């Protein structure tokens, strides 16, 4: 009998980290699916990987995930084991790769200027000082960088370059974010330097991330007998000394009632700490979304509770303590005429699904949009179209709307966008036929917050015998947060480490280790 046949696993949180951990427990750890229980506060799995709505009320995704074939090795490893919903003989990984072979990204309009013209994004805009400052950051050890902001490492000219406009909006960096995280991104994605102006390295799924990734994984896990406990908010865990630290009980609330799960000596707990999409709120055509500041979501509260009990579990407040430095807002358009989509295609020369991110470089909200290939949502009708966008500077007044983005309704955001494009002649038609759902996310880039070396705990804390921490707020040296890959890699470290599995975790991709890739990046940097 397999030694894990009788063991149970409790996974707190239903995001991609927990879903991946459940797959790995079954596929590599020999777990019986019926002995795995996923406890999720919401009524749906996927965490930040969302996609919902309908053609009448409007569709919505909070974010848009971009992947690369070289760097997302752990993600592809897991998805290679999951069959698609449409074809059980084809893996989700193969489906995504085939989609991107057919619909390759090659943006013709990565940057739009204030006069509605497409800027020459091949001109990165570097001067000698910019180049030296980038090289200095890349050469500097993290222990020396410490808690420096990005703006502490560069002169003002760098922040006006085309490169920074493209890099920051591709990955959602603010000038005040951690310089360590920028350094990691530049090293991890140096292969993108020569193609940052076209986003040719970006890979996307045929549908939104919920329909393309989460639903197939959830079905596979359900077919294996995994139990999903939705509407379950974990509020505390009991920790005991027993040849190291062990979790002995998990305490929850569900439908207003308290309940607990006993965690036996042979059992395991995998806990996703923090949440980038905690306390997200939707607006609509006529209302701006609410900004929630008091942590009603359980993810941050649970981590805080655990960290107070035991040293070595990190410092959650380093990431959740400054909403005004971590918030931004996205929006999804649901359009019932093709007028705007056709005009964007004429303007850019990109068919939907091939253009990647378009950024309005001089917009006061620093607005960016993506036009996906339809259908982007399962069941989306042929005569309905969608567009996703976001703004980084949401406290600034618009260039055309006399409100900050945070104060603007969905229709006001649409109006600002139409003026940024210079499409005023079809404004009324588009407004009449479009539903706009904006989303306020207080913690969306909190993982980029400046931090000390102990603020993010290891996946398996010192002394932990039966529990691991997962997600965007654990420390994985050299890897980059705000990526699906980071969450999946945390799951691999957690499952393989706790179970003592002698399996190799796919190595982190290093562009500098590839001579031709490094040479191309250096040529781009040096101009």
Image (tube, rainbow, N blue to C red):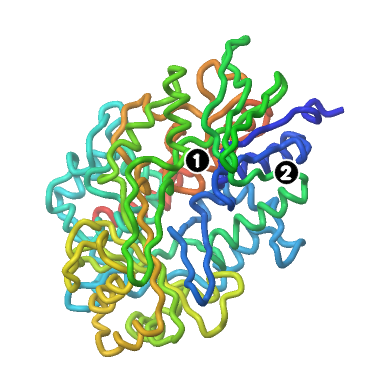
- Describe residue 201's horizontal placement relative to residue 291 as left or right: right
Place of residue 148 in the rendered image (x, y in percent of width and height, measured from the top left):
23, 34
Query: In the image, is residue 137 above or below residue 62?
Result: above
Q: Is residue 65 above or below residue 33?
A: below
Who's the residue at 37% across and 27% down the image? 315
333 is higher (above) or lower (below) than 141: below
Specify the farthest residue to the left.
156
In terms of image quadrants, where is residue 232? Answer: top right
Tell me if 382 is positioned left or right of 229 in this view. Answer: left
* CA gap, disc 2 and disc 1: 30 Å
Q: Which residue is mark 1?
A: 508
Task: Single out the residue that lies furthest toward the right.
Answer: 1
- Crowd around label 2: few <14 · some 14–19 · many ≥20 (10 Å): many
Q: Is residue 333 visible?
A: yes
**The label number, if any, that marks residue 226 in the structure image:** 2
> Between 343 and 108, which is closer to the camera in this rendering?
343
Where does residue 37 sit, x and y in percent of width and height? 68, 38
| SS for callout 2 | loop
Left or right of residue 132, residue 310 in this image: right
């Amino acid at each position: 009998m397999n030694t894990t046949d009788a063991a149970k696993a409790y996974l707190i949180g239903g995001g991609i980290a927990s879903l991946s951990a459940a797959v790995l427990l079954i596929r590599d750890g020999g777990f019986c699916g019926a002995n795995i229980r996923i406890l999720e506060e919401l009524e749906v799995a996927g965490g930040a990987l969302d996609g919902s709505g309908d053609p009448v009320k409007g569709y919505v995704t909070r974010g848009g995930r971009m992947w690369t074939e070289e760097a997302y090795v752990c993600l592809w490893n897991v998805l290679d084991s999951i069959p698609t919903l449409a074809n059980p003989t084809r893996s989700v990984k193969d489906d995504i790769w085939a989609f991107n072979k057919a619909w390759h990204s090659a943006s013709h309009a990565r940057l739009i200027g204030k006069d509605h013209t497409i800027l020459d994004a091949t001109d990165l805009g570097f001067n000698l000082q910019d180049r030296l400052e980038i090289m200095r950051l890349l050469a500097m050890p993290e222990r020396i960088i410490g808690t420096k902001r990005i703006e502490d490492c560069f002169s003002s000219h760098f922040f006006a370059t085309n490169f920074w406009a493209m890099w920051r909006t591709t990955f959602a960096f603010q000038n005040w974010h951690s310089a360590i995280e920028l350094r990691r991104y530049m090293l991890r994605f140096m292969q993108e330097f020569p193609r940052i102006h076209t986003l040719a390295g970006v890979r996307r799924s045929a549908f939104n991330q919920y329909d393309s990734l989460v639903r197939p994984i959830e079905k596979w896990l359900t077919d294996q007998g995994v139990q999903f406990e939705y509407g379950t908010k974990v509020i505390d865990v009991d920790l005991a000394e027993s040849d190291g630290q062990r979790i002995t009980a998990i305490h929850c609330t569900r439908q207003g009632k308290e309940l607990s799960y006993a965690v036996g000596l042979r059992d395991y707990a995998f806990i996703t700490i923090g949440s980038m999409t905690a306390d997200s709120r939707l607006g609509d055509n006529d209302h701006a979304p609410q900004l929630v500041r008091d942590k009603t979501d359980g993810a941050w509260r649970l981590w805080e509770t655990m960290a107070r009990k035991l040293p070595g579990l990190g410092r959650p407040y380093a990431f959740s303590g400054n909403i005004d430095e971590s918030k931004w807002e996205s929006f999804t358009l649901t359009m019932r005429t093709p007028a705007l989509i056709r005009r964007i295609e004429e303007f850019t020369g990109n068919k939907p699904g091939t253009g990647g991110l378009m950024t309005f470089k001089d917009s006061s909200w620093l607005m960016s949009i993506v036009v996906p290939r339809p259908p982007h949502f399962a069941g989306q009708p042929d005569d309905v179209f969608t567009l996703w966008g976001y703004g980084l500077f949401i406290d600034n007044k618009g260039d055309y709307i006399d409100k900050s983005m945070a104060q603007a309704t969905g229709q006001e955001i649409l109006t600002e966008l139409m003026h940024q494009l210079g499409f005023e002649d079809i404004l009324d038609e588009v407004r009449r036929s479009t539903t706009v759902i904006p989303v306020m996310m207080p913690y969306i880039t909190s993982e980029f917050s400046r931090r000390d070396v102990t603020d993010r705990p290891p996946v398996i804390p010192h002394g932990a015998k039966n529990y691991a921490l997962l997600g965007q707020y654990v420390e994985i040296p050299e890897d980059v947060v705000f990526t699906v890959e980071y969450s999946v890699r945390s799951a691999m470290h957690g499952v393989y480490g706790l179970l003592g599995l002698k399996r190799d975790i796919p190595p982190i991709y290093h562009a500098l280790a590839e001579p031709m890739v490094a040479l191309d990046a250096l040529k781009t940097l040096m101009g």
